[in-house]
Image (spheres, rainbow, N blue to C red):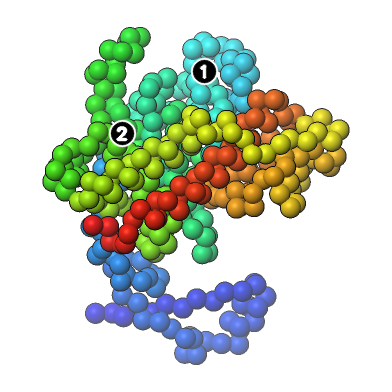
Amino acid sequence: MAKIYHANLYGLEQEKSKLLSNDDISKTNWSLITPQKPFYLLIPQNNDLLSEYNQGYKITEIMPVNSVGIVTGQDEKTIAFTQEKAEVLADIHRLSEDTVAPILYRPFDQRFIVYDSKVVTRLRGEVMRHLLKRENMAIVVGRSSAVTGNEEWNIIGISKQIVDLNFYRRGGGQVHPLYLYPNINQSDQSLLKEQRRPNLSQNFLNDITSKLGYTPTPEAIFYYIYAIFHSPTYRTRYAEFLKIDFPRVPLTSSDELFRQLAAYGEELVALHLMKSPKLDNTITQYEDRTGNRVVDAGHPKYQQGDVIINKKGDRFTRVPENVWNFYVGGYQVCQKWLKDRKGRTLSNEDILHYQRIVVALQETIELMAKIDAAISSFPIE
């Protein structure tokens, strides 16, 4: 059987060109690698924990109905910051205002879309219809890391609306709705709620029932999964495998641990859907310094707890540094949300929303530590 060797060469282009011109393969420091199924990666990989990791269920095995987010092909003509602006776009396209729907465009960034096949390239209707103006929520997770180098895996989010393909920095977030609704035109939401069914595979339900001695509610399972994916130890321990495929969910036989993680997951969900009452206790202030609340090019800038949005110095004060540096899906949330509003004047609602984002991220950081503290050790038992 043929042997496979691997070598890396890092550095600037000029340095690499010089090394390559003065070297040859006989002098290269090669490493023998043994690619493992199912991916047969041609790079070195630490597989010491692979069998442990593979004991968990892949998220796509748990929630089999899923797809990537929608693709408009022309965001500027179909997506707007407000419902009113989106209705104007619908009118321009000679479409009904009923085609306008909320969309989760980027982390913590809800906008409005003209959702119609006449103007949207990929509706992903087989999945998005379960979120389109329905009472539902979905886990949005990536198949491989949207970050580079040694950055922590963070391609996990949640939505109660349809989701854009580029919700994450490298795109491709897979949307997994909790509930599936019947494919009928029905305005009676109470009837639809009775007819909906959980998007949970029977094999997974059988296994979790066997471990716990009962079948948890779909919501409790959903919250448990969301908490697991926010465990810092989970992210670092399985970092090698999170880079190459959808994340796997380890199951516990401890009812106490399951319920505690589900409770933490429920808190995270409320924060990330901007529904938690904790968000009303803002920790920042907005200072107007004659910049008219306009987000200038080259901004925001972070200086000693202040997030400065323009050259005049308008700013949010008392933003914790760990919150400023918090990433979701490869995006630095507190920076990205403002940067995407370059040239816009922030409204009172925008300012309050940003302050609530800061609280949500601060609480998330604290909950992530609590999740790790609740899990006494890995592998989870």
Can residue 68 be seen?
no
Q: Position of residue 344 (x, y in %)?
A: 73, 30
21 or 240, nearer to the observer: 240
Is residue 85 left or right of 277 when viewed as pictured?
A: right
Picture disc at residue 100: 1
**35 up-or-down from 139: above or below:** below
Q: Residue at x 36, y 81 (%)?
A: 32
Write down the quadrant of residue 215 in the picture: top left
Vertical side of 145 occupied by 174: above or below: above
Toward the viewer: 260 or 206?
Answer: 260
Question: How far is mark 1 from mark 2, CA to CA?
Answer: 28 Å
Residue kind at label 2, given as amino acid type:
Glu
Seen in the picture, residue 94 relative to 221 is either above or below; the reply is above
- Which residue appears farthest toward the bottom when viewing the image? 27
Task: Name the quadrant containing residue 308.
Answer: top right
Q: Secondary structure at mark 2?
A: helix
Mark 1 or mark 2: whose residue is earlier in sequence: 1
Viewer can see residue 215: yes
Amino acid of disc 1: Val
Q: Residues within 10 Å of mark 2 (few under 14, many from 20)?
A: some
Give the residue pinned by disc 2: 219
Q: Is residue 287 left or right of residue 195?
A: right
